[in-house]
Image: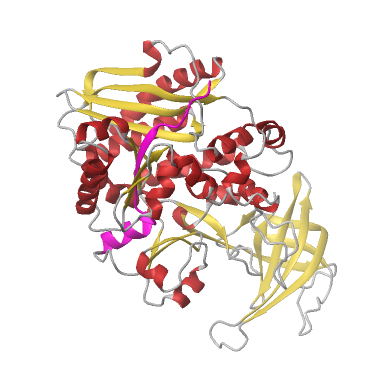
Amino acid sequence: MASGPTRVAVVAVPDWPAVAAGIERGDASGPVVVLHAQRVVARTAAAAAEGVRRGMRRREAQAACPSAHVAPHQPVRDRAVFDPVVRAVSELVPLIEVPEPGTIVLPARGPSRYFGGDGPFTALLATAVSAAAHGARAGIAVADGRLAATVAAHHCAGGPPLVVPPGGSAPLVASLPVSVLAEHAGIDADAVSLFERLGIARLGDLAALDEAPLVARFGPLGADVRRLALGDDRHPPLVADPPPERTFACTFEEPVEDQRAVAAACAPVADELSAHLAAHGACCAQVHVSIATDHGEQSDRLWYEPAGLSAAALVDRVRWQLAEWVEGRGPTSGVVAVRLFPVALRPLAGGQAGLWGGDARCDDAAVQASERLVAMLGAACVAVPEWRGGRDPGRAFVAVPVTAVDLRGRAASPVVPREAWRGSLPVPAPSVVLDDPPEVAVRGADGEPVTVGGRHELSGAPSCVVDGAGEWRVLAWAGPWPVEERWWDERRRRRMVRLHAVLGRDGAAPQGVVLALESGRWRVAARFG
């Protein structure tokens, strides 16, 4: 069932992660750069004036603006610093949606009528947001549809509010480049790049195409982008039987103050709600979460996800909303009820996973688990391995904070680059690298120790390896692979030779190892399998 766009108001603070880092540092107007996976994801206006752009590498950004303060990407900090802005807007409009820190979406028709029109309403919003955001460059706009209002809000950031008259959003959207679909509508950047390569430069060109070929080529995405190009909302309303009361209400006999206990209790409710909608061929794109306490206090929030909210995503929204409520003014008693009301539904379109590589469900689960740990413990307590390169397998990966790595993009690209380091071990890499390599004796067929000459030549073929558990026969070996590093540094220079060997003996399964000779001593540096 088709319908036209609704009147929407958007409050947007461009590059909010950088603004939040500046506010936390005490210098909201100075140059600040926020990095994620060693690339710029946000920068303040002062840093942008010096030539810093999104997507730049760290060194490029520091070369463009040496005085910029470099901060890591911390979603928890962004939400916490943005919470005063959310509370200020909530004083004017009780039910709002926060898609991400730095952006607030709210219905405009009712508040505009109450405050005397779009102009007075946006003026009140501007006053409230300016005081709560410490004078940050905020944009406020009212338009028909979410996309037009979001683009208008970013366009007027730092200036007076912008009101697009009714019926004027469609011409505005038609003149926009297709790149705004990835920037403000959540459309995959690869799909937007494909539109550009096909010669579709503006949304008006996309709207002029028939829907049938778009759906045939892109599936449900084709229908979504055409609706956006026409100025409509991304998802048309669907009609489904309302779920029974028990599937979206979670009540407690005694008030519960533990946030994790509340979120855990909502998991079965979210599962039943998702299963009910899936049985009708739909999923929840927008949900109204209402949390009530024993003292009659209530927190209401709208949550929106264009691709649809899974059961785990619904639980995450409940936990985030409760955490923000507690960190703000906070409830004065425990939670007695949590209710989930589906507001907007979208068709449950199946997706075909790639045969080799690409994103998988386990990748999404790993990302969600890391995000939960960061929310519970903080970014400094969660680390993941990152490839740094090198000839030593023990130094090729280092543990870095999870906020410094793009986990969602990691599954789509190999961790190890195509070109290996010169002098590194051949693939496959050993699966276990020992922190404290045990010392062993490597002997030839004549029983003499195997040594390495100045030209990296072995004195003889290795025949056996002796460790604390006894003697192992060398079934196969390859190498040597020499390493000579930092020969100019008296303290840090290193000279080492490594071998691949398959060891075996009676009653034990063969095992592959990496043998390393350094300072006249052989050690088992790593193991395979």
Q: In the displayed structure, would residue 253 be above or below residue 126?
A: above
Q: Position of residue 264 (x, y in %)?
A: 37, 27
Judged left or right of residue 355, residue 27 is: left
Pick the residue in front: 254 or 185. Answer: 185
The quadrant in which residue 68 appears is bottom left
Pick the residue in front: 275 or 301. Answer: 301
Judged left or right of residue 362, residue 24 is: left
Q: Is residue 8 magenta?
A: yes
Q: Does the magenta stretch include residue 38?
A: no
Q: Give the range drawn in magenta.
A: 1-25
Rendered residue at 41%/68% (across/down): 48
The quadrant in which residue 362 appears is top right
Q: Position of residue 46 (x, y in %)?
A: 35, 69
Q: In the displayed structure, would residue 393 be above or below residue 186?
A: below
Judged left or right of residue 104, residue 168 is: right
Rendered residue at 64%/51% (across/down): 193
Judged left or right of residue 291, residue 155 is: right
Q: Where is residue 361 in the image (x, y as percent from the top left)?
A: 59, 35
